Image (spheres, grey):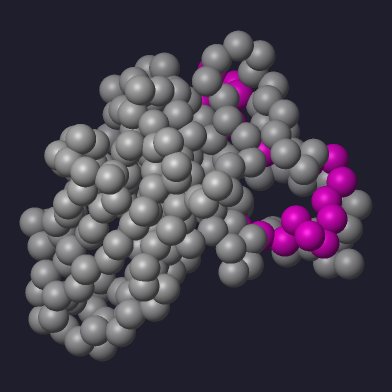
C-alpha cells in the first residue's frame, strides 16, 4: 500500500512570509500527485495536480509544487502568504495500480497571522 | 452546476445503531468514492462505486457497505456503530473514463457522532 507523509503538522506564518509544506510518498511506480486545501468550514478543494511533464506545477491562488522523483517528494510552495491562506492542506497520491483510490497525508494546518 | 452534495450534514447515533449517509455526485460524474476523516487525520479511503458495483475497497470492515443507484448517487451504510466510527464522512465524485488521471471533487461531508 502507498503512504503519504506530511511532516509539518502545524505551521504559523506572518503575512508575506514564504511557505513550503513537505510531502513525501512511498510508492515507487508512476504516481499522480495532488494538493487539496480545506478552508475553515468548507469542503476539500483541489489546489493543483501533477500527472506528467514539467515537474513544476502551478495551481490556483499563487500556489506551486515541485515533483522530485528521486526524493519521492511533492512539496507545496507559495512565495508570499496571505491571511486568507489559513487552512488545512492535504497531499494526496494515486497511481495506475490504485486506480481512483487516493491516499492522503495527515494534513498540515496553516495559520497566517495578519 | 451543482457540485457534490451530501446529506445529512450532522448525525448523532448511539453505539450499536445503524446509519445511512447519502451522496449525489457532480453533474457528468459517474463514480463515487467514500472517505472517512477522523479528527486530525487525512481522509481514509473506504470504497468506490462505479456502474452500481463496488470497484475498490480500503481497509474497512464489512460493517461498512454501500450502494450506487442508476442516477449515480450513492449511499454509505454503517452497521453496529462503534465510538471509533465518529468522524467526518466525505463523498467524492469523478469520471471513471479518466482512469487514474482524474480529479476527485469532494462534498462538504457528513459529521457522524457516535455516543
Which quadrant is home to the N terminus of chain A?
A: top left
- Up/down of A27 relative to A14, above or below: above
Give the x, y percent position of residue B92. 40, 48
| The magenta segment | A67-90
Residue for point 14% across, 75% down = B18
Residue A4 position (above or below residue A9): above
Q: Give the image location of residue A51, x and y in percent.
A: 52, 20
Asked which quadrant contains residue B43, the reply is bottom left
Instruction: Answer with left or right where residue A40 lies relative to residue A19.
Output: left
Residue B114 colored in magenta in the image: no
Residue appearing at x 91%, y 52% in the figure: A16
User: Quick check: B97 left or right of B65?
Assistant: right
In the displayed structure, does residue B46 sit left or right of residue B63? right
State the residue in front, B97 or B82.
Answer: B97
Question: Where residue B81 appears, x then y in whole percent?
Answer: 16, 75
Quadrant of the rendering where the C terminus of chain A is positioned: bottom right
Q: Is residue A85 magenta?
A: yes
Q: Residue furthest top?
A: A53
The residue under the point 25% across, 71% down is B85
Q: Is residue B33 visible?
A: yes
Amino acid at each position: 500500500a502507498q503512504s503519504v507523509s506530511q511532516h509539518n503538522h502545524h505551521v504559523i506564518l506572518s503575512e508575506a512570509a514564504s511557505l513550503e509544506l513537505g510531502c513525501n510518498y512511498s510508492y515507487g511506480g508512476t504516481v499522480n500527485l495532488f494538493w487539496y486545501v480545506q478552508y475553515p468550514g468548507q469542503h476539500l478543494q483541489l489546489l493543483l495536480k501533477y500527472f506528467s511533464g514539467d515537474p513544476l506545477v502551478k495551481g490556483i491562488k499563487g500556489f506551486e509544487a515541485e515533483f522530485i522523483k528521486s526524493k519521492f517528494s511533492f512539496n507545496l510552495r507559495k512565495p508570499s502568504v496571505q491571511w486568507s491562506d489559513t487552512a488545512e492542506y492535504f497531499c494526496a497520491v494515486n497511481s495506475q495500480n490504485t486506480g481512483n483510490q487516493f491516499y492522503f497525508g495527515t494534513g498540515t494546518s496553516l495559520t497566517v497571522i495578519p | 452546476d451543482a457540485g457534490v452534495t451530501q446529506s445529512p450534514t450532522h448525525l448523532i447515533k448511539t453505539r450499536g445503531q445503524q446509519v445511512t449517509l447519502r451522496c449525489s455526485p457532480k453533474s457528468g460524474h459517474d463514480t463515487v468514492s467514500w472517505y472517512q476523516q477522523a479528527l486530525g487525520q487525512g481522509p481514509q479511503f473506504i470504497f468506490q462505486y462505479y456502474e452500481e458495483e463496488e470497484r475498490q475497497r480500503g481497509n474497512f470492515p464489512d460493517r461498512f457497505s454501500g450502494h450506487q443507484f442508476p442516477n449515480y448517487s450513492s449511499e454509505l451504510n454503517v452497521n453496529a456503530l462503534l465510538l471509533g466510527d465518529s468522524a467526518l464522512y466525505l463523498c467524492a465524485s469523478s469520471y471513471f473514463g479518466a482512469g487514474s488521471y482524474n480529479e476527485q471533487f469532494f462534498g462538504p461531508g457528513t459529521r457522524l457522532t457516535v455516543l
